[in-house]
Amino acid sequence: MTPAGNLSTVIKSLADPTRRSVFERIAGEGEIAATALVKGSNVSQPAVSQHLRALRDAGLVTERREGRHIYYRAAPKGLAPLTDWLSRYEAFWRERLDHLEKLLEEGGDE
């Protein structure tokens, strides 16, 4: 998959509020069983499974099987396409805001 494809996949995956909530819960817990994700939400087991599959396909979570249980853990490297893309714009906006601040300071002297 191309880097742009990875970025699109990550953005699409996190755009869904329920999926984003599942991801945030996994990240906050460190590691959590899929059954615990279902019990702690108002989402059905099949829906949670679909969200977990999308997060896994996007590289945002990893799974570990132990007997019949599946445990999920956030994969920080999965966010790399998004953070790399945002970092390019961080410098752009910082420069623009610095320029705006300078203009405002100069305008206040008149």
Image (cartoon, rainbow, N blue to C red):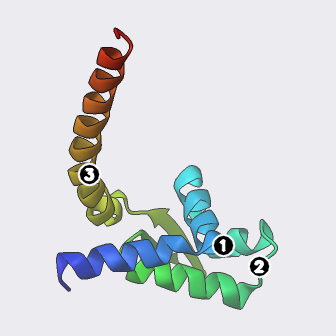
Expressed as whole percent of the image width and height from the top left, the position of residue 47 reads 68, 87
CA distance separating discs 2 and 1: 9 Å
User: 9 and 95: which one is in front?
Assistant: 95
Mark 3 touching mark 1, by CB under 8 A?
no
Expressed as whole percent of the image width and height from the top left, the position of residue 49 reads 61, 85
Name the residue located 66 percent from the left edge and 72 percent from the top edge.
18
Q: Secondary structure at mark 3?
A: helix
Residue placed under numbered mark 1 in the picture: 18
Q: Closer to the camera: disc 3 or disc 1?
A: 3
User: 65 and 37: which one is in front?
Assistant: 37
Going from N to C along the chain, the mark reached first, 2 or 1, is 1
Residue placed under numbered mark 2 in the picture: 43
Q: How many tags in the picture?
A: 3
Q: Closer to the camera: disc 2 or disc 3?
A: 3
Going from N to C along the chain, the mark reached first, 3 or 1, is 1
Mark 2 touching mark 3, by CB under 8 A?
no
Q: Amino acid at mark 1?
A: Thr
Q: Say if residue 43 shows up in the picture.
A: yes
CA distance separating discs 2 and 3: 35 Å
| In-image side of 18 versus 107 (left or right) | right
Residue placed under numbered mark 3 in the picture: 89
In the image, residue 68 sits, relative to residue 98, either above or below, namely below
Q: Secondary structure at mark 1?
A: helix
Q: Amino acid at mark 3?
A: Tyr
Residue most extreme to the left: 2
Where residue 80 sits, quadrant-wise, is bottom left
Q: Secondary structure at mark 2?
A: loop
Residue most extreme to the front: 110
In the image, residue 98 sits, relative to residue 75, either above or below, namely above
Where residue 71 sits, quadrant-wise, is bottom right
| In-image side of 59 versus 66 (left or right) | left
